[in-house]
Image (spheres, coloured by chain):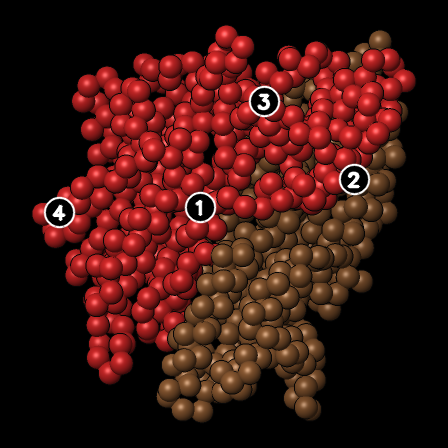
Chain colours: A red, B brown
Amino acid sequence: MFLKIIDLAINHGFLKRDILSKLNFEQYKYGPVGLHLLNNLETEWFFHFVINRDITVFLNKDDFTSTFAFSKKMCCDRLPLGIVEKKSREKIDHDLMQDKKSSENGDSIQFCTKFSEDETEFLKGTFFISPTQSTKFFHQFQRQRRIWWRRISASPGRYLLTDIKTCENGSQNVEIRARYPWGDQQIEKLVFNCGVNDLELDDSQLQFKEGRKTVQPHTVSSTINLPTMFLNFLCDGFDEPLFQGKPRTMLRFHRKLAPYMVSFVISGTNAASVSELSDLALYLSRQLRTHHISSLLLPSASKLGLETQYKQYDELGVPYTAVLNDNTLKDGILQLRSRDTTLKEQVHVTNLITYVEKLYKNY
Amino acid sequence: MFLKIIDLAINHGFLKRDILSKLNFEQYKYGPVGLHLLNNLETEWFFHFVINRDITVFLNKDDFTSTFAFSKKMCCDRLPLGIVEKKSREKIDHDLMQDKKSSENGDSIQFCTKFSEDETEFLKGTFFISPTQSTKFFHQFQRQRRIWWRRISASPGRYLLTDIKTCENGSQNVEIRARYPWGDQQIEKLVFNCGVNDLELDDSQLQFKEGRKTVQPHTVSSTINLPTMFLNFLCDGFDEPLFQGKPRTMLRFHRKLAPYMVSFVISGTNAASVSELSDLALYLSRQLRTHHISSLLLPSASKLGLETQYKQYDELGVPYTAVLNDNTLKDGILQLRSRDTTLKEQVHVTNLITYVEKLYKNY
């Protein structure tokens, strides 16, 4: 099944084969459509880690120590604060090597080894919490993180938290794992560190004020391997429900992740109506795009048959397809086909934007 | 004045000095707050180049030829199509060297030399257009690009298009430049290429269908140096209007670019009201954040004086500051101070979210 997903993903531009890979198994890179998905994933992650936090969160690139000093100053030496960063491979090679090693045991599929190493990046968030609140925060954070994965997933039941493991140095580790037919995948690592200073910071930098006391913060951190997250959502979305007796292959991306939110199909009966409907489709797709809704209008919209196009858009994971036909020219009503139900709703062309905006506003 | 801007930017975490730079003049890197600004800039760029286009646009990373082949197939060999990519330094070193050279003439300030080379990245969009429409497209595109810079600028009059220059190989070049007291800055380069194949593509790959004919597309491309764009908006936003006889330093970022959209000031007269107002501020900032509005609530909000905080938020470029005081506890009305006018509007706490959402929805 994994290979089936990979084939589908390569066909539709989510992945491509890394032709330069020197390893004895196939590795992949992001394809043109995949980069869209990646972008949406990073946006969701950024929203959850940076914007929608109770804690003030700062961004870092390369230089943790100076970012930490700046953040601490801006927060007047008070807790809590967070620092979030995107790291490339070299910098936490150590972690990667461990992951690699553990994946060599047995021949199970490990997402993190499937991607070309050039593409390996980690999203990391570190939160500095007052010792009196750190345990509570760690437990809330575990829950929040699991909810996050579940909310943008096509089958939320897949995501599990492992038990807390205590390491030799006293830190507590929890993993979030996704369950697949071919085995579990580690997709996020949470570490709770009370007192151990494993960051490149002096103890003197780690002095915060709390009322009149001086305290040393506890840290809670999350690390996500970006290609792993990407592959996870490709596999998470893959589904083959039976439709009229035959399996219908599709990628059931959450609305917030789908590279294209609305696609267009033109089904006119003669050249004149096709040309008029094409203009209408162009107009509607422009309108959607002005409203930040990414739409897909291909030259094939008026050339291929309905079923062929539905198949393509299901496999691309487009949640809704607007179908324009001869009647649309008469009464202004188009059909909005849902990927998940294959049912069609009637929407008047003047209401399309408002309706689609509503569909996409909520989770 | 340029140095004054740099000092301000370093103070508030937009920039930091590159301590490893071996050159005989200072170079900079993105600071923690600067990374927020950079993020917003890239989002605006992405929206303008990818989402809000009449043309179907594909994303590329590293491998232009394969992305081009995929895009062409998906568009059924029909024009137009676009490919957009973020390139790191190595790959268009050639262009960079030219820029560097031209900047060595005279001692004028050139944005592109001010940033550490590790950070140099280019945003590039290439559009493949049918020869019959390419000239029209090129002219529209120039206009669109200038409007884009003007729309998110604090002083739109700054942006100019240079005259069209025809190169030896027949391509036409136009630059967008920004006018500053210390001289003009090149901020974007547009190239119109009719027939010359300077991409790494075979002529056979460049065959598109148009009705029954086969045509070779013309290309229109835009290249932006990302650190240059970043520095441009820092300098573009800098302003020192007189306020009560004294210059008031601030960064007048457009709402869509500001790293923080709303900041909070708590001005209670006694400990009890301060603690109650702090809870209210936390509640409101959470609400804003859930609605994708990045807000800034610092521990200093209840500790420093009003004017000190206004100064800090003006210099950080926060467009609106919510001021909570003792009256807010009685009648539920807070004051929303505008950075640009220093005027305060009264807003009921229950209306804050809707009101701020409206402020940020439009350009």
Query: Residue B56 location, x and y as percent?
Result: 70, 30
| Labels 2 & 3 near each other (Cβ < 8 A) | no
Callouts 2 and 4 on one subunit: yes
Give me the residue at 28% from left, 63% from top: A129
Q: Spatial distance from mark 4 to mark 1, Cα to Cα?
A: 27 Å
**Precedes in sequence: disc 2 or disc 3:** 3
Give me the residue at 44% from left, 79% from top: B277
- Judging by the rendered image, the residue that carries numbered circle 4 is A166
Question: Residue A45: which disc?
Answer: 1
- Judging by the rendered image, the residue that carries numbered circle 2 is A350
Circle 1: element type: helix
Q: Spatial distance from mark 2 to mark 4, Cα to Cα?
A: 59 Å
- Judging by the rendered image, the residue that carries numbered circle 3 is A342
Residue B154 against residue B141 in the figure, above or below: below
Callouts 2 and 1 on one subunit: yes
Residue A354 against residue A295 in the figure, above or below: below
Task: Identify the chain of the residue marked 2, using the numbered disc in the image.
Answer: A
Q: Quadrant of residue B74?
A: top right
Viewer-nearest of discs 2 and 4: 2
Task: Identify the chain of the residue marked 1, using the numbered disc in the image.
Answer: A
- Residue B150 visible somewhere in the drawing: yes
